[in-house]
Amino acid sequence: MISINNGKWIRVRIIRQSVIEIILPYALIACLSMLSYDLANVYYYESHRMTTDYNHIFNQHWTIYQKILQHDYMGHQAVFGLLEGSLVTHFPDQSLDLLDIGCGDAQTLAAFLQTSALQSYTGIDLSKEALELVPKNVGSLNCAMTLMNDDFVAAIEQLTQEQVGQFDVIFSGFALHHVQDETKAKLFANIKQLLKPHGRFYLIDVYQQENETRETYLDRYLAPTLTHWHALDEHETALLNTHVRSSDFPSTRTKLESMAFDVGFANCECLLADPIHSNILLSMGK
Ligand SMILES: C[S@@+](CC[C@H](N)C(=O)[O-])C[C@H]1O[C@@H](n2cnc3c(N)ncnc32)[C@H](O)[C@@H]1O
């Protein structure tokens, strides 16, 4: 599990989901999950549950996400600026164990990761292609790095069997809106367990206004993609709209805050609620 990256030793472990596992009986799956192979200095582990052809989705959508970032259509700069400020305030000079849920290619967190003292970085994402870009985007962090290619609900469940109280910071950026409130609430409960006593959970996501239905939210959220997101061509705009309409289940601010308190977070600070971009940044502590 050791590989060389830019001359520095780091530990890179990519745990990969496999279609075999939904075809073969459980006992055989367990055996196969122990197999590993070496590819380009990265050790891949066959492991885990279900698969969707998520990499196909990744290939279609990542170019669009890059354009969105480049033009700051979703307001990443403001919300990630606030996140980094809060992390520096809460964790000065600390060597952090950081878990990134739905990390993608970790591009949006790269600047923080590169300038922080990290003990370990763990990223979870369904897209293997995205995970393969993480070492390139973050450079040599000189810390243990574990990349889990899995559904984050399953992966978090697994981590709560193995790593209770292990993380200083758990972060999720624009990923949890892919699951519904009930699943989010279970995730919040598991996330709290995974944090060290002084640890914090930072959530950046899209959020729905209190008086909105999902339909009115989607119409409002997608309106500027049709009129103002000029960097996307017609095909990309259509793909984006289809993806958001089928996959986004944002919660309201009240719902997110009550989930935090219901699972026992002692405090839940709202660092940003931006109704224009529909972005929220919450910081939760035990
Ligand atoms: C919009 S991107 C956000 C990437 C990065 N966190 C950021 O803030 O820019 C959402 C990411 O969540 C991942 N994702 C969505 N649903 C997932 C799930 N159920 N399990 C794991 N990853 C998931 C996608 O593959 C994608 O990389």
Image (spheres, grey):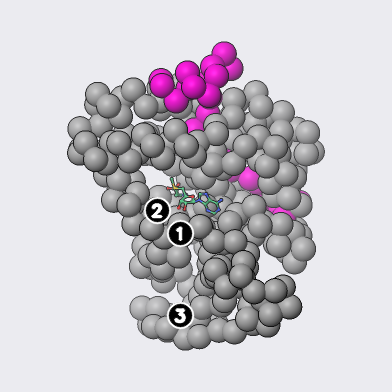
> Which badge, 3 or 2, comes first in the chain's sequence?
3
Q: CA distance from mark 3 to mark 1?
A: 22 Å
Residue span colored magenta:
194-220
Vertical relation: 220 (above or below) 126: above
Residue for point 25% across, 31% down: 229
Q: In which quadrant of the rendered view does residue 242 lie?
A: top left
* Residue 5 visible in the snapshot: yes
Residue for point 43% across, 36% down: 244
Q: 200 or 187: which is nearer to us?
A: 187
- Judged from the image, the secondary structure of the residue bearing numbered disc 3 is strand
Do labels 2 and 1 touch, CB within 8 Å? yes
x, y (%) of residue 284?
66, 39
The residue to which callout 1 is attached is 53
The three-letter code of the residue at mark 3 reads Val
User: How dense is the environment of label 2, judged by Cα within 10 Å: few (below 14), some, or many (20 and up)?
Assistant: few
x, y (%) of residue 76?
39, 39
Vertical relation: 133 (above or below) 77: below
Q: 22 or 94: which is nearer to us?
A: 22
x, y (%) of residue 59?
34, 57
Q: Looking at the figure, which quarter contains the C terminus? A: top right
Report the disc number at residue 42. Answer: 3
